Image (tube, grey):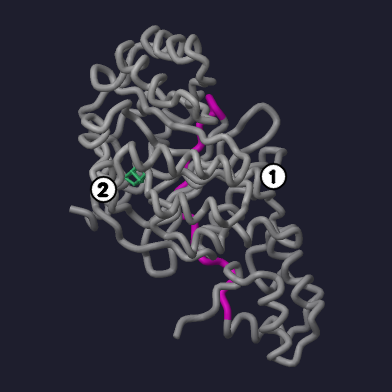
Amino acid sequence: MGKIKLKGLSCTELAELLLSWGEARYRADQIYTWAFRHLVRSYAEMTNLPAGLRARLEEETVLEAAAIVRREFSPATGTVKLLFSLLDGQAVEGVLMRYRSWFSACISSQAGCRMGCRFCASTLGGLARNLEAAEMVEQVVALEREARRAGGRVRSVVLMGTGEPLDNYDNVLRFIHLIAQPQGLGIGYRRIALSTCGLVPGIRRLAREGLPLTLSVSLHAPNDELRGRLMPINRRYPLSELLPACREYSEETGRRVTFEYALIAGVNDSLKQARELAKLLQGLTAHVNLIPLNPAVEGKLKRPEPGRVAAFAAVLRARGIPTTVRRELGTDISAACGQLRHQVLREEGTLW
Ligand code: SF4
């Protein structure tokens, strides 16, 4: 059996482990403070712990569930992209995005993805495996270090990197509870956003958790015919099932659902499609986030001209649908979903 990953334990679970070792409960708070407030990278730095306890922690647990193997920084936007190597050699990425005075950490929930969305590089090699909660926490910790280095703090966490979070439901939920702990990173539930391609049973289950998380649904098309071509998941859960599940989510949680719509030139960016989209979302507590496509490394899909994006947004707004156009972050450092991971896997020759 492998060592226990420390960042996968809640403060209470850590206290129980320490009690079973004959240690005092308050040691858990000390370790948590070192790991999540001071963000230390080794037990040796936890100087108020007895040497014997540090040695046992070293022997039976691992503090870091991933190592950074590549770092890219965009001076233009302040975006930092980290490529992590997990303990079994799998690669995942996390991105730190800078907003005016705060940072958002975008993390991956799976190594690879099996959802097959046509515009996404992350799915080209299929799903390697689900990430454990500790591996997701580790990404946030590393991005928090980057934020502090830049003079700020991570204020929100978005599960929008590689993977479909609701396809790894239990680990993702555990991760959310871990980062929300006040003794840990203290990211409030309202500041955590989960993005899904539309796994209806997962959305309904999440609605029942009673957590005020922000739910983002990747829509990308205003009808089943086109959505089915772009996103195979639509054949399993068509719009007639997806939209009622979204309505249920906003009714249960009181939160407005965000619909992500990546604009792809000549595919889903016509004004007719904008009108169709507005009609589809009529009556929902919804918000549309338009994302001019970040061209994938090996994709043939192109982004529309800025004028086209503005016209599409105007149609939605005129019909009462709150709409924003996502600021493009990190396009100069291959920050499209999954790109960096692919680049490295290709260089290493492990993917093809
Ligand atoms: S967009 Fe998300 S759900 Fe779709 S293939 Fe990519 S990682 Fe998976």
Residue indicated by mark 2: 236
Picture quadrant of residue 39? bottom right
**Identity of the residue drawn at 53% across and 24% down:** 76
Q: Secondary structure at mark 1?
A: helix
Residue 242 in the figure: left or right of residue 114 = right
**Identity of the residue drawn at 50% across and 49% down:** 107
Residue 301 in the figure: left or right of residue 84 = left
Q: Which residues are magenta?
A: 61-77
Q: What label does residue 22 carry, if any? A: none
- In this rendering, is residue 349 above or below 291? below
- Residue 68: x %, y % from top left: 49, 55
Residue indicated by mark 1: 148
Residue 181 in the figure: left or right of residue 308 = right
Which corner quadrant holds the N terminus?
A: bottom left
- Residue 122: x %, y % from top left: 32, 46
Q: Which tag, 1 or 2, sits closer to the chain's start?
A: 1
- Residue 199: x %, y % from top left: 37, 49
Instruction: Tell me if label 1 and label 2 are in contact, CB under 8 Å.
Output: no
